[in-house]
Image (cartoon, coloured by chain):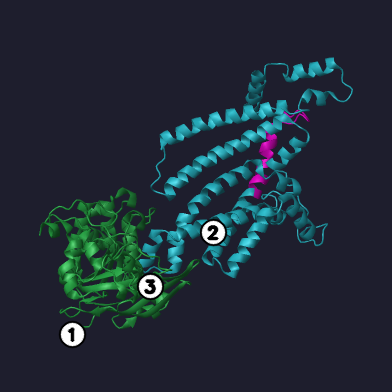
Amino acid sequence: MVAFIIRRILGMILVLIAVSFIVYLIFIVIPGGDPADRIAGKVATPENIASIRHNLGLDQNVFVQWFDMVKSLLSGTLVSYYNGTNVVQQIWAGIPATFSLCIGAGMIWLFFGVLVGTVSAITAGRASDRIITGLALIGISLPVAWLGLVLLYLFADGGLSTVFPPGGYVPLTQDPVQWFTHLLLPWFTLAVLFIGFYGRVLRSNILDTINEDFVRTAKAKGLSSQRIIVRHVLRASLIPIVTLFGLDFAAVLGGGAIITEAVYNVQGVGWYAAQAIGTQDLPPLMGVTLYGAAFIVVFSTLIDIAYAYLDPRIRLT
Amino acid sequence: MVEPLLDVKDLKVRFATEDGIVQAVSGISFQLEAGKVLGIVGESGSGKSVTAMTLMGLTRGVNARFEGEVLYRGTDLLHVSDTEMQNYRGNEIGMIFQDPMTSLNPVYRIGDQIVEAIRAHQKLDKRAARSSTIELLRQVGIPNPEARVDDYPHQFSGGMRQRAMIAMALSCNPSVLIADEPTTALDVTIQAQIVELINRLKGEFNSAVIFITHDLGVIAEIADEIIVMYAGRVVEQGTKRDVFYDPQMPYTWGLLGSIPRLDRPRAERLHTIEGSPPSLINLPEGCKFRPRCPHAFEKCMDEPALENRVETPGHLDRCWLEVEFKRDHRDETISPGSAEAA
């Protein structure tokens, strides 16, 4: 176990180094990416640009540039090219909103995904299954941006009704009721895609597992059908869902809910990333990417540990 | 006469599939008394497993149709509701399956899976169920059961898993034990141990046993009565003595001839039955074994009934051939080497 964790931590460091370098390279090769050009303004002289380049360290070897950026990010001194704000502080400020959004949405999509998948598998072939699978397909197909805007139009202040506020975020510590009403629409918007997807995956897993020999054994023991479904079928069928959930949840926690946060003006990490993309601001993007990558790596390790617990045949190596 | 535990009368099972109606079992009848062993033999697809699973209500489904009666102590199990059936499964009738590698749930401890079976039918607390589980594991010959009870299935070998399956099937002391090819997935030395174990436990638990296999050699060790199935039909039925010493059906001869034996001159090759079993959707006309039978003649275009044709009562077969002809010619199939030698 200790060896496993040490190996994973070393792996994580290598992944983060690679990710940060790739992000840096992508930024340099895309057209219009040179920050000095934009900072200098429309009527800049070549000398002007050159001096900005020099100040930002952009005239140095690409490895040195990358190393300097990562170093200042890690020491918490990296600032935006665009407005000079501190990247680490900005990400830190966005975490409560992002976590509120993602933990709530994650609970919703896991609960409804499992419910939808189980019900449609148990009633496979019947009308309820057809309806659920149809709705799941619709859920998967709805673009998040569109769904967010439609929900705002239908239910939020400024649209057809005034049940919900028109976006924004109120910290939980400030007013729990406002926190909840502000987040309810974003939670469902973010969850819908995953509910549909998890429901379909779980449905097919359950239908596979139901034909396993050990389910027949459970039946031959004289167990009730509820017990067979919950203890023998669901237990085995949920193992792949654990992987999906771990990675998806890590991705949204890591700032991946960019569209939802932008549509509802929830000023979290994803929203911060959206702003930085709009201004082609490299330092915040570097910060958010590494922050997100760290979540993915940590969660994939947690998934492996959960796997070993869920399936005793798996040994951590 | 003793009231039979299990009285199966003309059981028929059909399944609707995309390719057509599969007539998996077309009429099987037998009676089983306590302490007796019934062997059901046949190739894959002969309907022997479907028969066994139907007794347990495991073939129920929207596409399955049943006819006939399965009377267990007078109750027709074919017409018992799914919920009531739970009281029979595991409790009155226990079942062991073919593949012990996949028949146990890989994510639960062996002991917990047996405890679950016990607690499904008996009001025992966990501790009591656990100690009777340890006792069961000891009875089926698992060494050091106090420790092995907490192992997972992957920590058991194939033979040990099958022993654990037997312990599970016997955990509620069922009156009938169905063993569906329990030795097929095991190697030969383990096979013998498992057969011996079932034979011994049948006495200790006073259960009747239905032992299903494609291997007549295994049946010879354990069965009192034998049913030979082909294409969903019973083609020969009788005591072990009848079937082994006076077999009346050329298909049975083929099965007997395919067993390697040390007490006969060694043939160049073991006998094989030419061809393969017919599709259950599209059966041949007349006798179903006719296309593969070396002795088929015109009359075989009509299907013979399952009747008593020999002196011993209760020995039934489905073959038009004269009994004398069969007694003269069957050794050509059963032991070709010795026939040539004679």
| Residue A104 percent coordinates (x, y) | 63, 53
Q: Chain of mark 3?
A: B
Label 3, residues with CA under 10 Å away: few <14, some 14-19, many ≥20? few
Residue at disc 1, secondary structure: loop
Asked whether B194 or A51 is in front, the reply is B194
Residue B112 magenta: no
Residue A197 sits in quarter: bottom right
* Residue A14 visible in image: yes
Q: Which residue is mark 2?
A: A203
Q: Which residue is mark 3?
A: B285
Range of residues picked out in magenta: A79-101
Residue at disc 3, secondary structure: loop
- As drawn, the chain in green is B
Which amino acid is tagged 1?
A: Met
Measure the alpha-carbon separation of dots 3 and 1. 39 Å
Left or right position of B329 against A83: left
